Amino acid sequence: MTEDAPKTPKVDSTLSKGLSILENLAHSQKGKGVTELSVELGLTKSNTFRLLQSLTTLGYVKHLDNKAYAATLKMWQTGRASVDNLNLRELASSEMSFLSRETGETIYLAVPENLGIIYIDKIESQKPIRSWSPIGGNVPIHCVGTGKAILSANYGKLRERVKTQLTRHTDKTLTSITALDKDMDETIARGYAVDRGEFRERIWSLGAAITLPNGEAIASLGVSLPDVSMPDGGVEKYGALVANCAESVSEKLARR
């Protein structure tokens, strides 16, 4: 006799619909009304309204003055807590040490926050001329190597949000969506991002995304250095090192 195949767990329809509303609102730059949500998600207006009331009561959704609904920071806080529980610092520690030894430059571990990134760990360069940013520092996602790496992996979700937030920081900053589109294509093809002084004058950085098995970037590794310290062929060499180390951390995540 053959064993019966395991049954697929039944998904609660109410929970599934509520989560679809929450995900829709979380990816929207502006609030949405009951009718708009019901049409987009294929739900009845009455069902959509009831689910929105529950999500509002639980604190995941807020009712705006214009009668639209928007996701609150509670969803983001929950997501951040999940990332923190992955203990990324410990998972990436050996890769960061390896990068530090191989490059001699400052190494960063970063996580996304809205349309920016936060450095949650780093190893300082011991060179007299070096890059420096504090742990806890927040920088725009579109103009540093660690941020651009995360952005490229999640570009399908973030493009519409980031295209109106391309603030200029140096004359090298990419401030048009056309230029950013091209840069993201190149980043994906290379496997690592390159910042050529786009956030701070004469400070270059390279970054690669740390991803979950579904491809979503939840963090990145990066190396940052003054342009005068970049050796011949350094972009390709350091970029490949960062990409390999980020892949190693991603593989550790997949085994957890």
Image (spheres, rainbow, N blue to C red):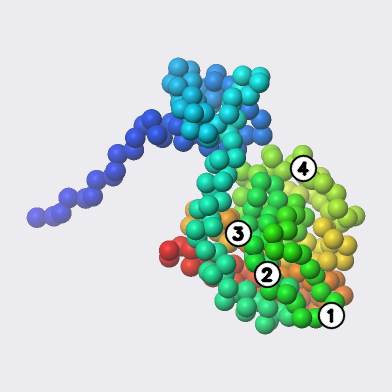
> Which type of secondary structure does the marked residue at label 1 adopt?
loop
Callout 4: helix, strand or loop?
loop
C-alpha distance separating marks 4 and 1: 34 Å
Q: Which mark is residue 165?
A: 4
Q: Real-space Cα distance between discs 4 and 2? A: 27 Å
Q: Position of residue 46 (x, y in %)?
A: 45, 17
**Secondary structure under the numbered disc 2 in the rendered image:** strand
Q: Which residue is mark 3?
A: 219
Q: Nearer the viewer, residue 57 or 118?
A: 57
Which residue was labeled with disc 1? 128
Quadrant location, the C terminus: bottom left
The crowding category of the residue bearing disc 1, from other C-alpha atoms within 10 Å (few below 14, some 14 to 19, many at least 20), is few
Residue 237 location (% of width, % of height): 71, 76
Please rate how many residues cluster around mark 4, counting C-alpha atoms within 10 Å: few if below 14, some from 14 to 19, many from 20: some
* Residue at x-position 62% and y-position 79%: 98
Going 58% across and 61% down the picture, which residue do you hit? 210
Q: Which residue is mark 2?
A: 122
- Viewer-side label of 4, 1: 1
